[in-house]
Amino acid sequence: MNLGPEIAPALAEDIRQSILDSYGILDTPDEAAYDDLIKLAALICGTPTALISLVDRDRQWFKSKIGMDPRETPRALSFCAHAIQNPRQVMIVTDATRDERFSHNQLVTGEPGIRFYAGAPMISPEGAALGTLCVIDHHAREISPAQIEALEILARQAVNQLELHRSNAVLEAANAKLAALSLTDPLTCVPNRRALNMRLDEETARARRTGDPLALLLIDIDHFKSYNDMFGHPAGDQALYEVAKLLSMRARPYDFVARYGGEEFAIILPRTNLEAAFAVAERLCKSVAAAEIAHRPLTLSIGVAGLSLNFDAGELVRVADRALYEAKARGRNRVVA
């Protein structure tokens, strides 16, 4: 998307701001890659001040700065806001006190007493002027064509760094999404067994460290094979989704509900002793039995286990599994701890 002269100024500014926001760079910490660029700019141009200035909605914010104390200034005072209006050339102000645009500017009449300014616009691949790489002096002066060219080169390098930052952010977001997908059961939209195992290891280690109680529920939907056989697998899939949704809604905010496999679910109950876990399990049994599941009601068998000092996560699962087996052996639709 190139910002051509046919675009209305207000619309162009909206697009420019949107592109600047897409970098996710505003208000980030100092980085050596940007600092090195302005050090070179100050050295080449012989100025005490150099900045990478990004023109935000109501401010200019300095990603990197030397010779300037504030991290940002109002956009209304910004030389760079003027520079990006003509992004195809370096804006040079040889003496700000003699330039009608800046002679009454607080940054000229007061601190830091700007006299000379040269700003090379930083242009995104889409054609948006994001800000400038600029140099500033307290004395009126000029710079050579070679120094102007150097500023343009450094401004392009600053944009390359911004592009790298944006690409890395996109990659990190994609990786985070993939990681979340790898830990989520696609049918029921609750965490899968891999996520359960990871969380159970964490909660077991925390409970053993703090001495807090910890409980685990293993849950089986009773006679689910006959439900599938009678009403078909699509109906069975919908029933699984409805049960998962109901368990998630009835669980406490800090509990962890996951699909264990097939028609089995598991819930980790942090800071919960065996008696309280048993009560939670009974409430879940009653909620599912009373729910309006398509075709016919469903019931649950639940095994409950509490963490013991000599248990690890694997032993907690094994004890809960034995309790679940006992619940089914006793006729199902019940809780065994």
Image (tube, rainbow, N blue to C red):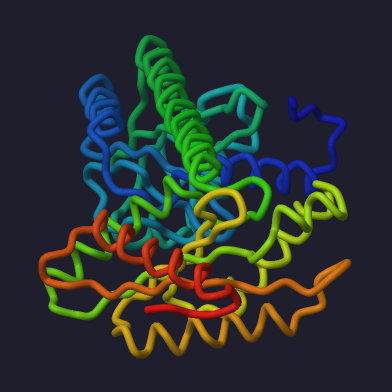
Determine whether, in the image, residue 1 is placed left or right of residue 332. right
Indicate the position of residue 191 as horizontal and vertical percent values.
52, 54
The furthest residue to the top? 146
Residue 313 vs residue 181, the one in the foreground: 313
Q: Residue at x 61, y 55 (%)?
A: 263
Q: Quadrant of the C terminus?
A: bottom left
Q: Is residue 84 visible?
A: yes
Q: Position of residue 118 (x, y in %)?
A: 42, 32
**Residue 233 in the image, given as x and y percentages of width and height:** 80, 46
- Where, by quadrant of the figure, is residue 203 drawn? bottom left
Of 131 and 293, the residue lying toward us:
293
Split into 4 quadrants, where in the image is the N terminus? top right
Residue sitting farthest toward the front: 330
Total tally of numbered discs in the picture? 0
Q: In the displayed structure, would residue 42 be above or below residue 213? A: above
Q: Measuring 52% from the left and 30% from the top, which residue is drawn there? A: 121
Residue 127 vertical placement versus 177 (above, below) = above
- Is residue 320 left or right of 22 when viewed as pictured? left
Residue at x-position 51% and y-position 59%: 258
On screen, residue 151 versus residue 306, left or right, reads right
Where residue 187 appears, as percent x and y from the top left, is 68, 49
